[in-house]
Image (cartoon, helix red, strand yellow):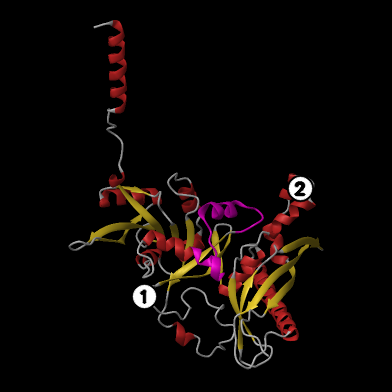
Amino acid sequence: MTRKKFICLVILFSFCSVFLTGCYDLNGIEQFSYAIAIGIDASDINIIKLSLQFTIPTSSGGEGTTSQSSNSTVVSVDCDSIDSGINLINSYVGKQVNLSHCKAIVISEPVAVEGVSQYLYTLINNIQIRPDCNIIISRCNAKDFLENSTSSFESLPARYYETAIESSQYTGLAETTPIHKFYSYIEDDFREATAVLGGLLSENNQSSIENQPYINLDGNYKVNETPVSGENKIDNMGIAIFSGDKLVGEVNGLETISHLLLTNKLKKCVITISSPFKENRPISLFITSPKSTVQTVEIVNGSPYITTEVFLEANILSADNDSDYTSIGNLKIIEEYVNNYMQEQLSSFLYRTAKEFKSDVIGFGRHLRTKYLTEEKLNQISWSTLYPNSFFSCKVHCTVGSGYVISKD
């Protein structure tokens, strides 16, 4: 054998040894149990009850056909901490729990009232938890929430969490809060945190609203109050309000629309107002916000004076045979009515955040940064102490279009 052939064989064997060698400690996907949601409840026998929801893919088919479906199961354990609970579940399921596909972290109200920082820091420190994993505050037990989080409109449980949360983009009745934003708000000195409010539909909701007027009612619900019936049991409406890491209150759907407007997050929504022309006649409006909200903050006699200007475009969705929504005069009347109505809603929401919740969930405190020359002087301001003393002035500029495809002769 010549020296040249010997060198070629050595190189060939070297490549084979690299590419044909197996990795004995490499884990395949079949060795993991992928959790799609985490639930945290208070425990009667330990510190917390940890629940994990797993997908269980199944397949069925007959001769010549194949179909696939997917369902889920929930495993719970009473434990000292999230990490110890996951370790106990590891031994139960016989596979290593993996959180890289987790879509939602559901925290029950009693736990949120006591404070979520210890659980939040643990989860944000876990490299498997993705930044877009959403925080949900549940008005029912988190375990019950996970067990009922299936949809007749979605075959994949993981996809259900995505579509349910994304509905806020076209209803305005909820707000998505991924864990990375929730964490930054908890740590922010000038803005408090909010989260999606979730829960189970109640069968007794209709009877609880019998004596209330139907006009403007559709936006006044929170989770567990909406008179919706169907196979789906989970509801997401309203937002949870935090002060620091503690839950301090909840707001309904219409107040959530106000919050989205003031934080420039409203995509589109539908609101219902009373007709200014006929008693007990509703008018439904399709609302969008074409411009960002203008905000100013001044300290007057030691108290914040906050002004907001909101810009809206509305199209009338309601129609009947004896109402003319095409004339300029009638549209101007509706515009004035909407402006006054929304100004009242915004002002009521803001005073509630300041006086009742004592929590700036809009982030008005950040406007103070331009009023202090140094970071040292800015840090001397306790915005959480100042905000409850705030006064508000709200102004709404709404342009109303008839939205008509039928016009009067």
Extreme residue in the top direction: 2
Residue 284 is at least partly visible in this image: yes
Between residue 31 and residue 322, name the one nearer to us.
322
Where is residue 398, by image quadrant? Answer: bottom right
Question: Judging from the image, what secondary structure is the residue with disc 2 in?
Answer: helix
Q: Residue at x 45, y 60 (%)?
A: 162
Between residue 106 and residue 81, name the one nearer to us.
106
Disc 1 residue type (three-letter): Glu
Q: What is the distance, in whole Å, between disc 2 and disc 1 at their CAs?
A: 56 Å
Whether residue 190 is in magenta: the answer is yes
Vertical order, 94 against 68 (above or below):
above
Question: Judging from the image, what secondary structure is the residue with disc 1 in?
Answer: loop
Mark 2 or mark 1: which comes first in sequence?
Answer: 1
The tag on residue 85 is: none
Q: Residue at x 81, y 63 (%)?
A: 300
The percent coordinates of residue 48 (x first, y second) are 39, 57
Disc 2 residue type (three-letter): Lys
Vertical order, 276 against 310 (above or below):
below
Whether residue 245 is in magenta: the answer is no
The residue stretch that appears in magenta: 166-192
Circle 2 Cα neighbour tier, 10 Å, few/some/many (<14 / 14–19 / ≥20) = few
According to the picture, the residue beneath numbered tag 1 turns out to be 231
The percent coordinates of residue 320 (x first, y second) are 59, 90
Where is residue 213, by image quadrant? Answer: bottom right
Left or right of residue 194: residue 139: left
According to the picture, the residue beneath numbered tag 2 turns out to be 377
Residue 173 is at least partly visible in this image: no
The percent coordinates of residue 189 (x first, y second) are 65, 53
